[in-house]
Amino acid sequence: MSYNLLKGKKGIIFGALDENSIAWKTAVRVHEEGGTFVLTNAPVAMRMGQIDELAKITGSQIIPADATSEEDLQNLVTQSMEILGGKIDFVLHSIGMSINVRKGNHYTNQNYAWTQKGTDVSAMSFHKVMQTLYKADAMNEWGSIVALTYMASQRVFPDYNDMADNKAYLESVARSFGYFFGRDKKVRVNTISQSPTPTTAGSGVKGFDGFIAYADKMSPLGNATAMDCANYTVTLFSDLTKRVTLQNLYNDGGFSNMGVSDAVMEIFVDNQ
Ligand SMILES: NC(=O)c1ccc[n+]([C@@H]2O[C@H](COP(=O)([O-])OP(=O)(O)OC[C@H]3O[C@@H](n4cnc5c(N)ncnc54)[C@H](O)[C@@H]3O)[C@@H](O)[C@H]2O)c1
C-alpha cells in the first residue's frame, strides 16, 4: 500500500546489489511512496549484481561510487543534485563487508589489513558520505540520513567477527556526525538495527542459518524482513519523524529486549 509519504523528496540509495538486498527493497518502497533517487554501488557490484533492473523498475539513474573514495563520493553528490534537480532529502547507507568474515579468519586471528579494509568500507564510509554531503551543503533542511546496523555492536555474537566492531563504530559516527548535521543543517541521522536477514552480506556470516532461526524463536514478533526494514526506513525519510535523530532504532521483532522466550526454553526443559 502506498501513502505518498515521500512525494517530491529526492535521495541517494547506496547498496542495492540484488533483489534480496535491504537497499533494493527500500528503493522499491521509496519509489512507491513517490520519492525519486539516484542508485549507487561500488563499481565491482555493477558487474556482479542486477542494479540495472532496479533502475528500470524505479526510473532511476545509477552512479557508480566506491564509498571509501572521497573523490567518488564528491562526484556522486554533485551529479545526483544535477540529475535530481536540487538538494537531497534522504540518504540510505546500506553497505557492509568484512574480508575476515568472507575468508573465514577467526576474530582471534585477524589479518589487520583486512580488518582495516572492512572498517573503511563498513563504518568510515558513513563518515565520508556525511562529510561529503555536509561540506557540499547538499542536504535540504529536515532531510534524513539512515544507516543499517546489527545488534552485535552492543552484545556478543561470536561469529559476527570484526563486523561487530565496525557496527559499533558506525553507530557512534551516526551520533557524533548527527549532532553537527542537526545543529547546522537541521538534518537527522539515525541507524536501524535490523534482524538477521537472508542477503548476500548476511549469509556470509558463519552459521547464519542457526543465527537467523535462533533470533526468530527469541523474538515475540519474529524476525523483521528486508521489506519490514524498507517500510521502517520510509517512515524515517518522511516528515512524520522530523525530530527523531541520533538514535539507534531496533527493527527486530523485539529481540533486543528479550532474555529468553518460551520457544527457546522448550529446547532445554526436561519434559519427562
Ligand atoms: N543481512 C543481515 O542479516 C543484516 C542485519 C543487520 C544489518 N545489516 C546491514 O544491512 C546493510 C545492507 O546489507 P544487506 O544485508 O542488504 O546485504 P547486501 O550484500 O545486499 O548489501 C551490501 C552492499 O554493500 C555494498 N558495498 C560493499 N563494498 C562497497 C563499497 N566499497 N562501496 C559501496 N558499496 C559497497 C555491496 O555492493 C552491497 O550492495 C549492511 O550495512 C549490513 O551490515 C544486514
Image (cartoon, rainbow, N blue to C red):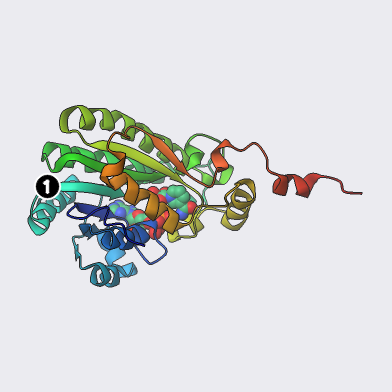
* Screen quadrant of the N terminus: bottom left
**What amino acid type is highlighted by mark number 1?**
Lys
Residue at (63, 50) in percent of width and height: 214
- Number of numbered discs present? 1
Give how far across and how far down residue 105 sits, in percent: 51, 48
Instruction: Name the residue tied to disc 1.
Output: 87
Horizontally, residue 225 falls left or right of residue 28, namely: right
In screen coordinates, is 235 left or right of 184?
right
SS at badge 1:
loop
Percent from the top left, x then y, of residue 167?
Answer: 42, 40
In this rendering, does residue 108 appear at all?
A: no
Is 21 in front, or is 100? 21
Q: For ligand 1, give the image quadrant.
A: bottom left
In this rendering, would 165 be left or right of 207? Answer: left
Q: In the rendered image of this protein, does residue 210 appear above or below residue 250? A: below
Residue placed furthest toward the right = 272
Residue 40, how many percent across, how many down? 24, 58
Q: Where is residue 215 in the image (x, y as percent from the top left)?
A: 59, 49
Residue shown at the point (25%, 42%) measured from the top left: 144
- Please say whether residue 252 is visible from this viewpoint: yes
Residue at 65% of width from left, 36% of height from top?
259
Residue 173: quarter of image: top left
Identity of the residue drawn at 30% across and 29% down: 176
